[in-house]
Amino acid sequence: MKVIICGAGRVGYGIAERLSEEGNDVSVIDMQPSLIAGITETLDVSGIVGHGAHPEILAKAGADEADMIIAVTLFDEINMVACQVAHSLFNVPTKIARIRAQSYLAPEYSDLFSRENLPIDVTISPEVEVGKTVLRRISFPGATDVVRFADDRIVMVAIECMEDCPVVETPLKQLSELFPDLNATVTGIFSQGKLFVPNSSDQLHSGDLAYVVCDKGHVRRTLALFGHEEQEAARIVIAGGGNIGYFVAKAIEDYQPKTRLKIIESDRERAVALADKLRNAVVLNGSALDQKMLLQADIQDADLIVALTNNDQINILGSVMAKRLGCKQNLVLINDPSYQDFTKTLGIDAHINPRAVTISGILQHVRKGRIRSVYAVQKGSAEVIEAEALETSPLVGRPLREIELPPGIRIGAIYRDQAVIRPDGDTKIKAKDRVVLFAAAAAVRHVEQLFRVSIQYF
């Protein structure tokens, strides 16, 4: 597949890295020569220095042969115009744009990105996607990562195995026998710095991170089984009242009205605006690094601090300080990947990587076949994928025990007729089933083939 990426920043680099590793023909455009030099020196991609919306630059990148353009520069307007030019002059089939300004995405302007107006097939809003991720983490305390699939009926939770975890040193097959009515499947394990897809004879050990796919109604019981019985936060402090902070605060007010919420925002004008927009939240003007400000927010009584400023250092240090002052848990937004490997030693309970969230949102539209949703884990080492089975799929109609799945793939759950099915050897996948599975990076192409539309389908 021929793909053009406009923008060689962190998100653009991450997408280029994933797509080039999978053998796609990738061209990257950016106005900064240093970024293009960096990306072409480290990745197998073509680099063009120039304005991503200019026709001659798109032509130089091979737009006349491109299957897709992904515009992720820092400027919404450049992203939008790049997609328009790619459509009007080069007839590029698929156009994806990162849109950050929420005014473009307001419901009353939903026709803006239609084919007749601005022909953008997919818009990605990092702030909204990150905000949703934060809310999912808040909903299931004890999980280090949470993603929902199949109309929110299936959930993937990443759970750390504590020392007193009752499921450690037990073969996964035996866990299924011990808890036959628990609709949950361990699909991936991150152990001693390595991620692998387990088989039924593998065991979990203390300190491992398990990726478990389960029925939404069984998440809390699954967390308890792994030794996590943390209560949902009743008192939350949000550090940072930007777009993400406001999105999270507004959602908490709308859907968890009993939660006591306080926001610390350093910009006075922004703090006043937040106080006017929110009904019940207490908004404080100050720095999350100011101990007096944290105490004024009653951090010593808080169940959770969520640090969402644009500054990684403030997020990390403010969260560490909050815990030392008595806050029970912290959740931190971290942009710089170099900080993410030290979160444990720094005292960070859970963190969110905005780049990974944005890349996952884009990948589901890049994948071939009937792929409905994609979420990348462990810096792209694996993906959790939701795909729709067609009549021509080799998975359909036979017991799973008779199907030799490619290495690196484990099926976690099947969604059929609004019911969640935990797969076993006797399970038969039917046409139109939605299958949620865990796939190592090297196995993703096999997943695409398993769910690809065959010529016999037509």
Image (spheres, rainbow, N blue to C red):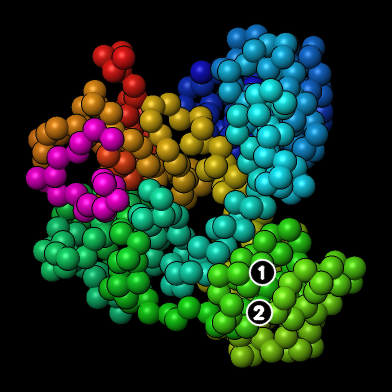
- Between 251 and 169, the one lying in front of the other is 251
Residue positioned 16% across, 54% down in the render:
201
Disc 1 is placed on an element classified as: helix
Quadrant of the image occupied by residue 436: top left
Could you tell me if residue 347 is visible in this image?
A: no
**Magenta residues, dominant SS class:** loop
- In this view, 99 is above or below 157: above
Residue positioned 80% across, 34% down in the render:
77
Magenta stretch contains residue 419: yes
Q: Report which residue position mark 1 lands on.
A: 249
In the rendering, at what x and y percent does residue 392 appear? Answer: 24, 23
- In this view, 174 is above or below 28: below
Q: Going by the image, does 233 lie left or right of 338?
A: left
Disc 2 is placed on an element classified as: strand
Residue positioned 67% across, 61% down in the render:
247
For this orientation, the residue located farthest to the front is: 108
In the rendering, at what x and y percent does residue 161 appear? Answer: 34, 69
Quadrant of the image occupied by residue 105: top right
Q: Report which residue position mark 2 lands on.
A: 261
Residue positioned 73% across, 58% down in the render:
243
Q: Going by the image, does 407 lie left or right of 264?
A: left
Q: Quadrant of the C terminus?
A: top left
Q: Earlier in the sequence, mark 1 or mark 2?
A: 1
- Between 232 and 334, the one lying in front of the other is 232
In the rendering, at what x and y percent does residue 438 appear? Answer: 34, 45
- Residue type of the residue flagged with mark 1: Ala
Q: Going by the image, does 148 lie left or right of 6?
A: left
Is the Cβ of the residue at disc 1 closer than 8 Å to that at disc 2? yes
